[in-house]
Amino acid sequence: MFGEDTFFIEEEQTEIKGQTRTLLRKLMPYFTKFRSKIITAALLLLISTVLGLFGPILLKHAIDVDIKMGSIHGLIRTSLLYLSLQLVVYLIGYYQRIALAYVGERAAALLKQNLYNHIINLPMRFFDKNPVGRLLTRVDSDTEAIKNLFQTTAVVITQDLVLLVGMSVVMSIINYKLFLIILVLLPPFIYAFWWFQNRVRPVYLQIRRKMAEINNFVNESAQNLPVIQAFNREDYSYQKMERLSNEKYAQEYVGMKMWYRIWYLVDFGEVLGLVLVLGFGGIWALKGFVTIGTLFLFASYITRVFMPLRGLSDQLNIMQRAFASAQRIFNIFDTETEPQPVSDAKLISEIEQPKVSFQDVYFSYDKSKDWVLKDINFTIKSGEKIALVGMTGSGKTSIISLLLKFYLPQQGIISLEGNDLTKINNQVLRSRIGFVPQDIILFPGSVFDNLRLFDLNVPLGQVKQAAEQIGILKTIENFPSGFDTDLITRGVNLSVGERQLLSFARALVRNPEILILDEATSSIDPHTEHLIQEGLIKLLKDRTAIIIAHRLATIQMVDRIIVIHKGAIVEQGTHSELLKHRGHYYRLYRLQYLKQKP
């Protein structure tokens, strides 16, 4: 059984040290799928980098040989050779970048797809603990940070390391004494990079956490804007956004200060290197120990040596951000998805007369024994229609969530025709249940796609048949483009009644044996009420149904009413039986349903 803490992704608690190698090992499969492109790009990178080392050597030759001997033809030849070399380097670099861009984009897309697929298969407990904005940050900006790690950082670091090794070899061959003087500068830089890597990643984890908080707050504010404006809470929202932005800025400022320390250390190192070369090399040149061309080559290489080091400082900054993102992404991948049992129990699709049974069921949303449902026992016969009624928070929705296996009970058994739900595959179970939630959810897309939920295997004829049975076919055909009419998010370009009837038709498309309906509580006009009730009668015909009922008309059309109070079943019976009993239902009826009578 999953525990509460299993699903809570908290970045501050993520271990920082010793993770780089593990993260790289987890990331590599996404890139090695494109091995041939990577090998091609690596070879091109190696060739262009090595060829780039010959530029200063040609310039040294021009100074020490062509200019010194006054050879115009030699100088022209060397210049043309230098120009040709640079053109080849640029051309190879272009194709190398294109190859890596292809790999980076494909790998990032694959990572994003796998992450999204993993998220939508996580148990509902995970979403109880992790807000939407945080997950959006993982799927979008965190995967982009990893793409940049490969497309830019890996290329720059590899190129810089090859340059450093190549230039070190050339300088040591031409004049090892000058090279040893420059080599003295390396230990401080190695220590500085090590210090930066260990100090900055916790900062970037904090930055990513703040980004997720901001994304989540913006998402919630946009969804609840009417409430914010109606209650004049714009100032509060602004102040909270300002606080979150300032907290993110504070962490960004700490990270930038660390990065600029490295940046200016590299700049100062370049100046110090040139001073050493010109100081010692200049004296040796005056004494005839080295040529002017050698001094020029070393000065040129000094600039090129520190350019990679400056690039490394830049890329370390990007790299730590990317590793922080990778840690957050793989924290989600490490969260277990919904268990999919393999059992010899009959598939629900083979059950001709489904019967639902709850036996001694206890359920809580967390580890505590503060039961949301306790000692729940009832059976629903095939074709029977029952209504769950009770005050808000009594546990009605929790019963439906358990039947759909959004959650698993801590105690007791829920069965379908004698088969324990834990032994039935989730997709098989849900494919035979029609679910109409209280909040009508319609997606951007056509009416046709919404009714079949983008399942290409469902033909238009099947959808039309369901719409006709519910009584909304003519309404749909009168839309501007009929079934091809595009819906805005949540179907806000339709009336309340049209959205409700579409949700009924969608449930009917798959012809489910069992129907679960969480009836809407919103106030609607009598005409819409009449349309919805007619559609509901057609939807319930010849089906086993469980309804969270809020309307008196719905209460009166069911076979049995189960009254839930504080997580327990307190009464069962028909409408008239429960009224005669004068218990919880009688009091609830007088408070909630009697006022609905005309």
Image: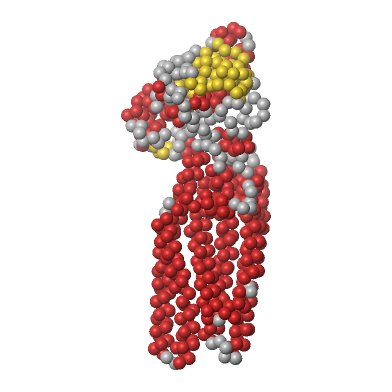
Q: Residue furthest bottom?
A: 70
Q: Quadrant of residue 486?
A: top left
Residue 101 % position (x, y): 44, 58
Between 176 and 437, the one nearer to me in the picture: 176
Quarter of the view holding residue 368: top right
Is 249 or 123 nearer to us in this picture? 123
The relative height of residue 30 versus residue 314 in the rendered view (above or below) is above
214 to the left or right of 381: right
Residue 3, image x, y percentages: 61, 34
Residue that appears at 55% across and 21% down:
413
* Nearer the observer, 434 or 463: 434
Taking the image as shown, residue 362 lies to the left or right of residue 470, namely: right
Q: Is residue 163 above or below residue 531?
A: below
Count of numbered circles on the image? 0
Residue located 55% across and 19% down the image: 358
Which residue is located at x 53 percent, y 53 percent?
24
- Percent across and percent down for residue 241 are 63, 47
Q: Residue at x 49, y 54 (%)?
A: 147
Viewer can see residue 207 = no
Quadrant where the image shows the N terminus: top right
